[in-house]
Image (cartoon, helix red, strand yellow):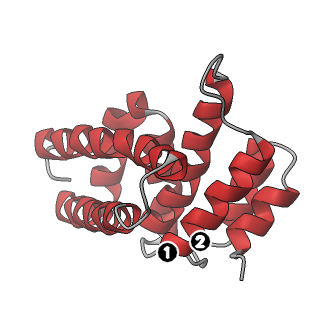
Amino acid sequence: MKSCIVDIFINAEEIESFRTSVISLGGNFIFDSASMIDLGTAYFERYPDRFSNRNTEEVLLGYSLVRICTVEKMVEKLEDGKKESFRSIFADVSKTADTVAMLVNRFGRESVLQDYRHLSESLQCIKDTVDEIPRGMIKERFVGGISNLFNILYVLKMNIDKSDGG
């Protein structure tokens, strides 16, 4: 049985329509290793991998698909007023300082720190799920897709630690 994110990918003409459709689910989709493999299979059917003359754009697109789904699962349980702020940080790490300052001012440092902990735990759970995928190109796209999210979480934590407390 295919998961809904696979159907969304199959029907999406480009990455932005995929992103919009996945966000509209509010994180309410299955993102277990089987659905990750299904998404990877559909991705490679559309963008067959080559061992020579690899298409960098297609590889980066695969990473983007993974990040879109991962970020939505990470922010799923956050307050609606915070989700878009965290999405913006994961989309563009250069927005972290300003976004954290705004969040701390509005919700308080402890609340934002709690959100960081939740995001970190969620990403670790997703990584653990990715670890269940057998070795191969699908796993590579997922590992590549989530790797920079750990770096962004590090920058997020640094900015929370530097915040005034709100």
List x then y, in percent, for residue 109: 19, 57
Q: Residue at x 75, y 44 (%)?
A: 16
Which label sits on residue 35? 2
Furthest-top residue in view? 53
List x then y, in percent, for residue 151: 28, 38
Q: Eyeballing the image, is 125 above or below 165?
A: below
Q: Is 48 left, or right, of 129 in this rendering?
A: right
Find the distance from the CA under tag 2 to the CA under tag 1: 5 Å
The reply to whether callout 2 and callout 1 are in contact (CB within 8 Å) is yes
List x then y, in percent, for residue 114: 22, 67
The amino acid marked with disc number 1 is Asp
Mark 2 Cα within 10 Å, few/some/many (few <14, many 20+)? some
Q: Foreground residue, 7 or 81?
A: 7
List x then y, in percent, for residue 84: 53, 54
Which label sits on residue 32? 1
Mark 1 Cα within 10 Å, few/some/many (few <14, many 20+)? some
Q: Secondary structure at mark 1?
A: loop
Which label sits on residue 129? none
Q: Is 145 left, or right, of 12 in this rendering?
A: left
Image quarter where the N terminus lies is bottom right
The amino acid marked with disc number 2 is Ser
Residue 69 shows up from this direction? yes
Residue 31 shows up from this direction? no
Furthest-front residue in view? 51
Q: Residue at x 48, y 49 (%)?
A: 136
